[in-house]
Image (cartoon, helix red, strand yellow):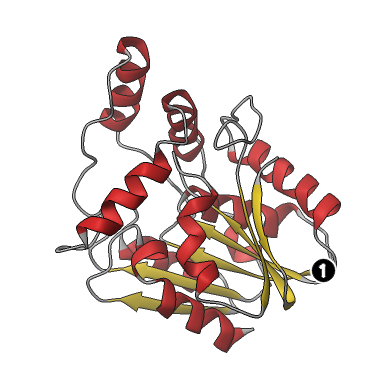
Amino acid sequence: MTFRHEPGTGPTLVCVHGSADNHHVYDRLLQAMPGRERYAINLPGRAGTDGPALDSVAQLEAFLSRFLESEVQGDYLVVGHSLGGGVALEHALSSASERLRGIVLLATGARLRVHPMILQLFEQVVKSGSSIPPLPPGLYERGSDPALLAEASKHRGLTPIETGGLDWRACDGFNRMDDVKGIRLPALIVAGTQDALTPVKYARFLAAQIPASELHILEGAGHMLVVERAVEIAELICRRW
């Protein structure tokens, strides 16, 4: 299994990426948190982590739990972006670990329904072998640095198209809207006003349901706020834990 690890003080951050991504999506966030013990992991089927890729959040959470048991010592936080946020919620609901101190939910929701056009797009690309066309507006901020976009595209290329398609299927099957009110752990929730994939209403729902939650809405941020607003997110995490 491939992952990035930086030593430091706890509680340890364990960062889980979103659909069609890999651990590189957390490069800037990890760089913004020197001195903290932190991991960014790859889910199966991408960027050097063996497959097969998994198609449900429950399976992805089981993978995360195995990683935590084998690699992480002491107290920890799970940081999840998009699909990774679903995995963080699933872990908070299913894990009995007393070491789990809280969750950080970035551009995510209790339900992650995917537009059928996105699912069909990935299926067609897999069959045809063509490349993925540009994703919809709201992924990045308006006027984003072209160098940042090029870097993100290069890193995303380490995730096979087939794996990305299964990630989106996992998102589409995830629904914990009736259950998240049972989470009693502290939760830091961050959303962007320009996010078209997981809009602000998703974050507001989570904040209303999870008693020990803290909500931050970043003006102008898109779905990839984990990359573009890494410094702000690092400050929010360090302030809370």
Query: Which picture quadrant has residue 56?
Result: top right
In this rendering, position of residue 75 left or right of residue 212:
right
Rendering coords of residue 140 (x, y %): 25, 57
| Left or right of 147, for residue 84 | right
Q: Disc 1 marks which residue?
A: 99
Residue at the (60%, 30%) spot, across then down: 54
Seen from the viewer's position, the closer of residues 93 and 150 is 150
Q: Is residue 126 left or right of residue 138?
A: right
User: How many numbered marks, from 0 up?
Assistant: 1
The residue under the point 52% across, 42% down is 174
178 relative to 226, above or below: above
Q: Residue at x 72, y 41 (%)?
A: 63
Quarter occupied by residue 93: bottom right
Q: Position of residue 178 (x, y in %)?
A: 55, 54
* Front one among 26 and 189: 26
Between 36 and 67, the residue placed more toward the observer is 36
Q: Within 10 angstroms of label 1, few (less than 14), some, or many (20 or more) residues?
A: some
Q: Quadrant of the C terminus?
A: bottom right
Say whether residue 79 is left or right of residue 154. Answer: right
Image spot of residue 110 (x, y percent): 49, 54
> Looking at the image, which is closer to me, 146 or 165?
146
Which residue is located at x 39 percent, y 63 percent? 227
The answer, for residue 106, to whether it is visible in the render is yes
Q: Amino acid at mark 1?
A: Arg
